[in-house]
Image (spheres, rainbow, N blue to C red):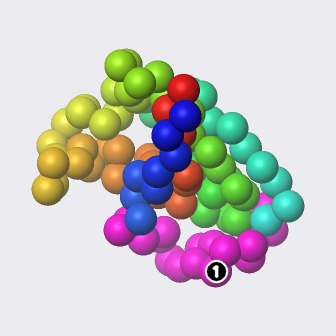
Amino acid sequence: MTTTSPTADAESPAGLAAVEGAGPLSDLRVIDIATLFAGPSAATIMADFGADVLKIEHPTRPDGARTHGKSKDGKGLWWIMLGRNKRAATL
């Protein structure tokens, strides 16, 4: 299993959950196995409010948001938005 922080350089909007362990959902742990937009968006919002979110991806079929649309510095902009404030693991 590999664990990374996919968006360490991405900032959360309006400084939500800027301090680890802060926010109304700080006691919540979430496993995000969803792909593309709806599920990852919900998990991102929970992370913005302090939840500890772990994004799980398949090693050869990563989330489609990684490559969807335009990119900056080799990272898809959708991935930067949807992956913020999450830890990531490949199983």
What's drawn in magenta, residue-wise?
A: 9-25
In the image shown, does 25 or 62 lie closer to the viewer? Answer: 62
Residue at x 14% of width, y 56% of height: 73
| Residue 80 sits above or below residue 19 on the image | above
Count of residue discs: 1
Residue at x 67% of width, y 74% of height: 20
Q: Main secondary structure of the magenta part?
A: loop
Task: Where is residue 36? Give x, y as percent.
Answer: 43, 28
51 to the left or right of 41: right
Residue at x 54% of width, y 26% of height: 91
Q: State the residue position of label 1.
A: 19
71 to the left or right of 51: left
Task: Where is residue 88? Give x, y as percent.
Answer: 52, 45
- Badge 1 amino acid: Val
In the image shown, does 3 or 9 lie closer to the viewer? Answer: 3
Task: Where is residue 72? Give x, y as percent.
Answer: 15, 54
Q: In this orientation, does residue 91 appear?
A: yes
Task: Where is residue 11? Give x, y as percent.
Answer: 42, 71
- Could you tell me which secondary element the residue under label 1 belongs to? loop
84 to the left or right of 43: left
